Image (tube, rainbow, N blue to C red):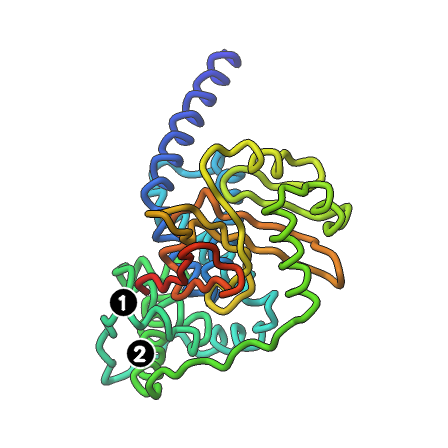
């Protein structure tokens, strides 16, 4: 009997796992879109999604099969976003939003803001209002579903929606943010990293990296860079590629380029974290094709261009 019960449990988990895989195949771009707007960064959003899906997989054996998977995954992703924001030292803002009374419903609610541009200005809102506006006005969840996702009440969601919509409606026209302060040491490291990558100087690359540097190839690998076959994979590629220094939504990044119609065009993004004069973390988004189109701007340094490499600005 115990053996039969074990077989049944294994079969139930396999069925649940297949449903999980099928769901995230279709849901993944939406999860990334939500997390990107919550964190204010397309790259940070992808990292949060990765962590959320890993956490969901670890909890899959406890999932109630009578519940739909999509809201459960959104709930986990939302909670990971809140954790991320708190780690980024906005704990006071998050707590202030959470402490406002959930039972207050405005007498004259402001209507939903349907312009897609709302996604790019929600960072002006505290996390709870930001989440409610995104989930209701962008992802079209019901008030009851939003309340469950953000661990609130319907009245609390209505109040957060009204506050958020009112603040967004009162915002002045968007202006171009000031350029980020340059980091000469990081710039030097990125240029060395790209130069040696393009020369296939793998030993020279390893000299730029700390012994405990971490690597994440999104959806493929996460672990120590020193143990990964990362550079060998690029060396064995048969399609032409090259790396360039650039920016992804204003953040320093390595841009992987691919030949297209005789020129070189951005193909994927690589994030490189540094401490002092060494590289401590590499995140390669080559297997996440939704990341590049989600960026507002991708700029390749003019000096890094070869042939007809262009900077691109995907649709927001």
N-term mark: 1 or 2:
1
Q: How packed is label 1: few (under 14 Cα within 10 Å), some, or many (20 or more)?
A: many
Mark 2 = which residue?
Answer: 165
Label 1 element class: helix
Q: Residue at x 55, y 59 (%)?
A: 245
Q: How packed is label 2: few (under 14 Cα within 10 Å), some, or many (20 or more)?
A: many
Residue 80 in picture, x, y percent from top left: 51, 56
Residue 206 in picture, x, y percent from top left: 72, 45
Q: Residue at x 35, y 80 (%)?
A: 163
Quarter of the image holding residue 221? top right
Asked whether the residues under the numbered discs 1 and 2 touch, taking CB atoms below 8 Å apart as contact, a structural biologist would say yes
Label 2 element class: helix
On screen, residue 227 versus residue 46, left or right, reads right
Residue 149 in picture, x, y percent from top left: 39, 58
Mark 1 = which residue?
Answer: 137
Q: Residue at x 37, y 71 (%)?
A: 120
Residue 46 in picture, x, y percent from top left: 47, 53
Q: Residue at x 75, y 61 (%)?
A: 277
Residue 202, numbered circle: none
Q: CA distance from mark 1 to mark 2?
A: 10 Å
Quarter of the image holding residue 311? bottom left
For the C terminus, the image quarter is bottom left
Nearest the camera: 214 or 190? 190
Nearest the camera: 59 or 199? 199
Q: Is residue 106 above or below residue 291?
A: below
């Amino acid at each position: 009997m115990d053996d039969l019960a074990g077989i049944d449990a294994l079969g139930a988990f396999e069925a649940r796992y297949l449903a999980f895989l099928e769901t995230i195949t279709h849901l993944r771009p939406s999860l990334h879109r939500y997390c990107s707007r919550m964190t204010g960064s397309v790259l940070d959003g992808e990292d949060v999604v990765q962590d959320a899906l890993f956490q969901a997989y670890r909890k899959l054996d406890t999932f109630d099969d009578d519940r739909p998977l999509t809201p459960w995954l959104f709930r986990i992703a939302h909670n990971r976003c809140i954790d991320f924001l708190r780690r980024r030292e906005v704990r006071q803002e998050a707590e202030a939003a959470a402490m406002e009374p959930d039972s207050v419903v405005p007498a004259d609610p402001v209507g939903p803001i349907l312009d897609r541009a709302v996604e790019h200005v929600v960072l002006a809102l505290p996390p709870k209002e930001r989440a409610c506006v995104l989930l209701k006005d962008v992802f079209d969840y019901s008030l009851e579903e939003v309340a469950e996702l953000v661990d609130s009440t319907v009245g609390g969601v209505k109040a957060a929606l009204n506050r958020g919509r009112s603040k967004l409606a009162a915002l002045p026209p968007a202006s171009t943010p000031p350029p980020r302060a340059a980091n000469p040491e990081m710039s030097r490291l990125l240029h060395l990293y790209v130069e040696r990558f393009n020369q296939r100087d793998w030993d020279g690359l390893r000299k730029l990296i700390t012994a405990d540097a971490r690597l994440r190839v999104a959806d493929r690998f996460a672990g120590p860079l020193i143990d990964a076959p990362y550079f060998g994979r690029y060396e064995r590629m048969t399609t032409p590629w090259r790396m360039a220094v650039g920016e992804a939504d204003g953040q320093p990044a390595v841009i992987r380029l691919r030949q297209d119609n005789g020129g070189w065009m951005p193909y994927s993004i690589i994030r490189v974290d540094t401490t002092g004069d060494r590289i401590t973390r590499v995140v390669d988004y080559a297997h996440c094709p939704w990341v590049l189109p989600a960026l507002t701007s991708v700029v390749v340094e003019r000096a890094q261009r070869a042939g007809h490499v262009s900077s691109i600005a995907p649709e927001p």
